Image (spheres, helix red, strand yellow):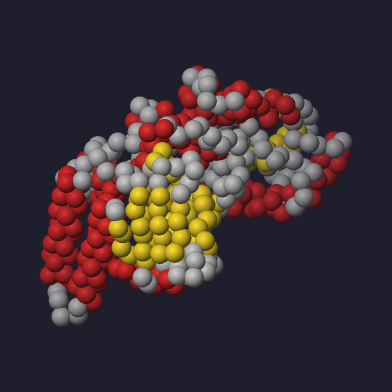
Amino acid sequence: MQKVILRNLVIIALVIISFSAKAQDNNILKVDISFEIPQLANKPVLIAYPFWGKTYISDTVFLDKDGKGTLVPARGMEKGVYKVVWPPSNHYAEFIVDSEKSFSFRIADIDNYIFTTSFSGSEQNNLFYQYLQFLVEMKRQKDLIEKDKNLASEVKNTRTKQLDMGVRKIQDSLVENTTGTLFSAMLRLASGYGLEDRTDYFIYRKHYLENIDLADARLARTEILYDRVITYIEQLNDEKPDSVFAACELLIEKARPDKNVFQQMVTSLLNKYATGKSIFGEDVYALIGNKYYVEEKPDWVDEATRLRIEQNVKKILPNRIGYKAPDFTFKDIHDKPFILHQHVNTGVILFFYDATRTGIGMDLKKLADAEKKYKQRGISFIAVMLTPADKPKAIKQIADNGIGNCINLISDNDSLVFNNYHIVNGFKLLMLDMDKKIMYKNISLDNIPEVLDHYLN
């Protein structure tokens, strides 16, 4: 059974969806790999692989009294980068599974494995470790330049740039001379192969994905692909739902030629934004879910899971950032009707809460403090109680919690609110502009000052 190591699995709140599609046969290699690690004699080592931001154990190899052992998986191994992990430290050495079916792997010193690892029968792995050794040496030279107190800053910068240019030439040469290998594909990803101008942000972003085959199934079992994908999404695009979705869509479509990688990419990105850790995460989740699960109705997802995603999407899309918040009419504690879209003010903090939640009084104190600070700057604070007791008790609770100066509403249609605002666990906080467009959502009460200061300034 596969178990996660080194990084923890995230339990998805909006949808739990696992990727279970079988790898294509041409990406599975029957292998016979011999290991020799004298320092780990009579001990087990784990064989693990990275996969979309996590690391999984696939096998265990028990080393004999001489530190030798053999790995011959019955099903074979999917091509990619693997790790030999030695407990209990979980330190590891990497090796490539690509085209060579039988090879031996020896580590003379686990504390200095980059310089003491050798392979027999695998030219690609030997080249891989020569490259790692080269990078270590370049870093050593860089550090010497930085620490040399006798060198002026200009000289340091010049020498550092010369080293970088030398590294880049070596990388480009290796990419071209090892075409077709996983090592070459990895170098394309890691080195930014083909990016002539790396200083101009817009040019760098425009060409960032060129010369990269995102449909290469081997790359899914490397940490490089995941890191490159996340860098493109999070660092080279605006932090807006539509922009992030456009980046995700581009990546997914580049992976579509390989059905297996395409499914991996869709599932991985959907799960990434299902966690709701960012203020716009659920919007991106809904946009991915809408296109690839609702509209395309994929046959590689069971229908029950697809329907759960579709239900979530329908709840989230009406309250996306940048769009007008769904209107509602509720009565306040004085029985006067309040219509959201008719309310006039500079901005609105809209807070839905379950009055029965433990600790809600402490939360509402934060809301009251923010109201005192920002009311004079034209910000309205609307608190909607979702599960009131009888009215007198509700009014007393509002007074006891110090939010009497807010606009206090009592929902008489919780299902409407939950459906239109996708409220999870009885709590939702949004910031609307004067036109009632959603500017921020899923923010905490602690973040209200930061959000309002940014909006008002």
Q: Position of residue 210 (x, y in %)?
A: 25, 37
Q: How far across and how far down the image is residue 232, in percent?
A: 35, 42
Q: Nearer the viewer, residue 364 or 36?
A: 36
Residue visible at 56% across and 37% down? Answer: 18
Residue that sits furthest to the front in the current view: 65
Q: Residue at x 44, y 64 (%)?
A: 68
135 and 278: which is toward the camera: 135
Q: Which is nearer the eye, 205 or 132?
A: 132
- Quadrant of the image occupied by residue 207: top left
User: Residue 95 vs residue 453: left or right?
Assistant: left
Is residue 172 visible to the viewer in this orientation of the structure?
A: no
Q: 178 left or right of 66?
A: left
User: For residue 252, which quarter of the picture?
Assistant: top left
Residue 33 position in % (x across, y down): 40, 53
Whether residue 173 sits left or right of residue 109 in the image: it is left
Q: Which residue is painted at 19% across and 80% down in the image?
A: 149
Q: Residue at x 62, y 31 (%)?
A: 421
Q: Nearer the viewer, residue 356 or 140?
A: 140
Residue 95, x across and y down, in percent: 36, 54
**Does residue 105 show up?**
yes
